[in-house]
């Protein structure tokens, strides 16, 4: 995997496939009950294969998403060091953790309705919420504004609000702080 986006896509695909496989297994258990096979009989099948906890998780609808182990994360780091490149797992990790948090809330009774695009890095340099380009102001208006006389309060270095609210002493302090007195 060469980019963080590749890691995020693979993580999504792997968990979606795990979810679908477990959901199909739960469906098979439910179908067995529908045709009259007792729950204890299906439980025994799992028990013989040392999968009691799997059976209990499936019938409860538990989905436990896969997250890369520390060993796999170290492998990414080793590959990055050997190739003298950035660690793509490190770049992808925040998105993987966000996706994992959402998946933790899923049950096998739900649909896998995550949208991969919500977790991919933004490739649009302006971003999705970029503002449209602002047109330049009309030069005639700008020239007219330059010719409007400025209030004498502003010439003193105080805003109209400061001039209205400050005492004479506060006005002098403000002007001194601004280097105007």
Image (cartoon, grey):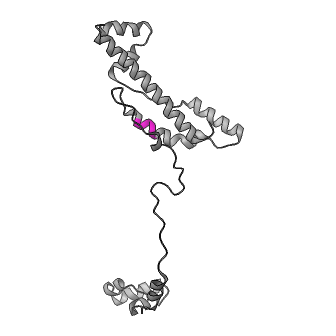
- Comparing 145 with 158, the one in front is 145
By secondary structure, the bulk of the magenta-drawn segment is best described as helix
User: Residue visible at 33% across and 11% down?
Assistant: 32
User: Residue visible at 30% across and 10% down?
Assistant: 39
Q: Position of residue 9 (x, y in %)?
A: 53, 36
- Residue 129 sits in quarter: bottom left
Magenta span: 98-102
Q: Position of residue 72 (x, y in %)?
A: 58, 30
Looking at the image, residue 177 sits to the left or right of residue 31; the answer is right
User: Residue visible at 69% across and 39% down?
Assistant: 81
Magenta residue check for 100: yes
- Comparing 40 with 138, the one in front is 138
Q: Is residue 117 above or below residue 28?
A: below
- Comparing 25 with 162, the one in front is 25
Q: Quadrant of the N terminus?
A: top right
Q: Position of residue 50 (x, y in %)?
A: 44, 10
Question: How many labels were placed on the picture?
Answer: 0
């Amino acid at each position: 995997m060469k980019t963080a986006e590749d890691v995020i896509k693979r993580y999504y695909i792997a968990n979606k496939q795990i979810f679908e496989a477990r959901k199909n297994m739960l469906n098979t258990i439910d179908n067995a009950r529908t045709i009259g096979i007792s729950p204890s009989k299906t439980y025994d099948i799992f028990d013989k294969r040392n999968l009691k906890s799997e059976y209990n998780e499936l019938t409860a609808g538990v989905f436990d998403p896969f997250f890369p182990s520390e060993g796999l994360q170290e492998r990414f780091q080793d590959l990055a060091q050997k190739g003298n490149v950035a660690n793509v797992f490190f770049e992808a990790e925040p998105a993987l953790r966000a996706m994992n948090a959402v998946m933790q809330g899923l049950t096998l009774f739900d649909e896998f309705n995550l949208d991969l695009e919500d977790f991919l890095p933004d490739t649009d340099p302006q971003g999705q919420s970029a503002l449209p380009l602002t047109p330049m102001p009309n030069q005639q208006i700008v020239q007219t504004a330059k010719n409007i006389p400025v209030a004498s309060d502003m010439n003193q270095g105080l805003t109209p609000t400061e001039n209205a609210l400050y005492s004479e002493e506060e006005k002098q302090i403000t002007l001194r702080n601004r280097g105007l007195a």
